Image (spheres, rainbow, N blue to C red):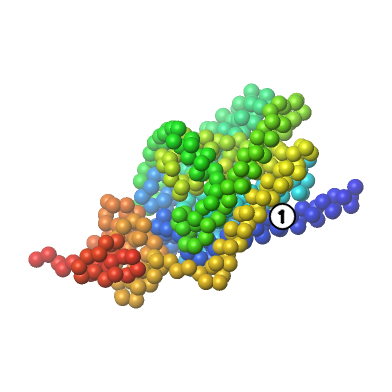
């Protein structure tokens, strides 16, 4: 018996290392290069620079009413010690991915019937998703990977109502849909028939959440460039329901052919395959047919992490259909990332049923092979001949020409400012998507030195890549 336990522990250790290695592989390109970067991410980088230098006290994304800047506070010490770079900007995101794997492993290994192999198969959809999702899981935009950490930590704190409330209060301000964790815990208690006995605990948690949210909102009034709080509107619709199944879910699981360039990833590759989606749908139908009735013994499964993961993922899917204001937009798959946890939970449910184990292993291996191949191809592309990035070329050209101040559109401005290390101060004009107030102040103070970067040809403007750099306008007489 002791030898069996040691053998299982040794196998488990090897498999856990393998899962973390897969996370390292799929994170290498987006963490080490500018393969996936934009002005939204650049704003968070500027915020971390400001915090590290003592120039600001950012609590929320500059100019926004949401996105508590948790990741900024994690980056600032790295910036202070190692300097600001694309790697130090995204390193905390990568480490959160590793933490998620560790928490999933810890929670699922405690469930009977899984063992190290079942746990590994359950975590694979997160450890090695498609290259599109891999880029989003280390995207420094506020609220992509952080909700994974918050909702999994909530599961481990479910018996500590005040600590849970503090965690979920912060999580809610970081990304509203992190609160799904609280409702998932309520539903688990309802399924177990223990909701009535735990009402006081849940009320304590709810009051603590409200207190943390109010306190941080009040504190934010003294933070840098805070836009105030705003309402959350319901926008359900059939279009989003269809988009969920035809666009977003295939992207999420690597079940559709996707050009990386369409997702703002600088690459010539296309990844994913429809056979993954077809196999996953077939597997879900079989799983539903086997599990449509629950015996009293099987209901005990609803108290573990796998049930919690399914509820969180299903809640994220429902929130996307109800709240997403962008039906048909391929880029908003980032609002659906937590739904990956539902797939992890369903794999765990299926693995505990011997009749489904072989089918489950085959489907997850198919998904893993297809997604691994896409990530490996992306790594090879950047290792052999990294594609050039237009915005980096523009930034370098501006520095070479001695340009210090630029006025341009949002998606160009902050990207340039970050890439140049703020040697070029670039911002939209005031009131047109500007995020960094001190940038606008600097442009106003040096108006005679402000160049304009536009996307259409104009007389007297120099073409650089796909932009045109126009010299400062002469002062009005």
Q: Position of residue 460 (x, y in %)?
A: 20, 70
Q: Position of residue 401 (x, y in %)?
A: 31, 75
Q: Position of residue 232 (x, y in %)?
A: 41, 36
Q: Quadrant of the C terminus?
A: bottom left
> Residue at label 1?
16
Q: Position of residue 42 (x, y in %)?
A: 42, 59
Q: Say whether residue 124 is visible.
A: no
Of residues 389 and 300, the one nearer the viewer is 389
In the depicted structure, whether residue 271 falls above or below residue 243? below
Of residues 108 and 117, the one nearer the viewer is 117
In the depicted structure, whether residue 260 falls above or below residue 339? below
Identify the image quadrant of residue 31: bottom right
Looking at the image, which residue sits at the far left? Answer: 477
Q: Say whether residue 25 is visible.
A: yes
Identify the image quadrant of residue 10: bottom right
Secondary structure state at the residue bearing disc 1 = helix
């Amino acid at each position: 018996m002791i030898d069996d336990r040691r053998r299982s522990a040794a196998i488990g250790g090897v498999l856990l290392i393998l899962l973390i290695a897969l996370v390292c592989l799929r994170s290498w390109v987006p963490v080490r290069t500018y393969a996936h970067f934009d002005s939204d991410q650049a704003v968070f980088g500027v915020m971390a620079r400001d915090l590290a230098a003592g120039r600001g006290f950012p609590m929320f994304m500059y100019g926004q009413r949401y996105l508590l800047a948790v990741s900024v506070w994690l980056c600032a010490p790295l910036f202070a010690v190692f300097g600001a770079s694309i790697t130090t900007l995204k390193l905390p995101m990568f480490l959160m991915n590793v933490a998620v794997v560790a928490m999933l492993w810890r929670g699922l290994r405690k469930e009977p019937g899984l063992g190290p192999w079942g746990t590994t198969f359950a975590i694979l959809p997160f450890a090695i998703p498609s290259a599109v999702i891999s880029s989003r899981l280390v995207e420094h935009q506020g609220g992509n990977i952080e909700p994974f950490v918050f909702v999994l930590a909530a599961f481990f704190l479910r018996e500590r109502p005040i600590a849970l409330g503090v965690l979920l209060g912060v999580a809610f301000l970081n990304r509203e849909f992190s609160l799904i964790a609280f409702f998932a815990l309520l539903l688990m208690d309802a399924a177990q028939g223990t909701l009535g006995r735990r009402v006081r605990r849940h009320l304590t948690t709810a009051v603590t959440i409200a207190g943390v949210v109010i306190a941080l909102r009040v504190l934010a009034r003294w933070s840098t460039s805070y836009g105030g709080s705003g309402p959350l509107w319901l926008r359900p619709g059939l279009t989003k329901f269809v988009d969920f199944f035809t666009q977003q879910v295939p992207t999420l699981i690597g079940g559709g052919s996707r050009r990386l360039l369409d997702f703002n990833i600088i690459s010539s590759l296309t990844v994913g395959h429809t056979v993954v989606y077809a196999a996953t749908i077939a597997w879900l139908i079989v799983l539903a047919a086997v599990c449509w009735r629950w015996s009293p013994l099987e209901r005990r499964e609803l108290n573990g992490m796998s049930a919690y993961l399914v509820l969180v993922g299903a809640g994220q899917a429902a929130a996307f259909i109800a709240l997403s204001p962008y039906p048909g937009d391929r880029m908003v798959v980032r609002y659906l990332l937590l739904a990956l946890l539902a797939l992890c939970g369903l794999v765990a449910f299926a693995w505990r049923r011997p009749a489904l184990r072989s089918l489950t292993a085959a489907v997850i291996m198919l998904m893993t092979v297809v997604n691994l191949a896409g990530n490996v191809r992306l790594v090879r592309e950047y290792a052999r001949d990294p594609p050039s990035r237009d915005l980096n070329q523009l930034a370098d050209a501006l520095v070479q020409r001695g340009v210090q101040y630029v006025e341009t559109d949002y998606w160009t401005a902050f990207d340039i400012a970050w890439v140049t290390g703020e040697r070029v101060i670039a911002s939209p004009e005031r009131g047109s998507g500007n995020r960094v107030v001190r940038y606008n102040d600097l442009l106003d103070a040096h108006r005679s030195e402000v160049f304009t970067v536009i996307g259409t040809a104009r007389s007297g403007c120099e073409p650089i890549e796909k932009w045109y750099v126009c010299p400062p306008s002469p002062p009005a007489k």
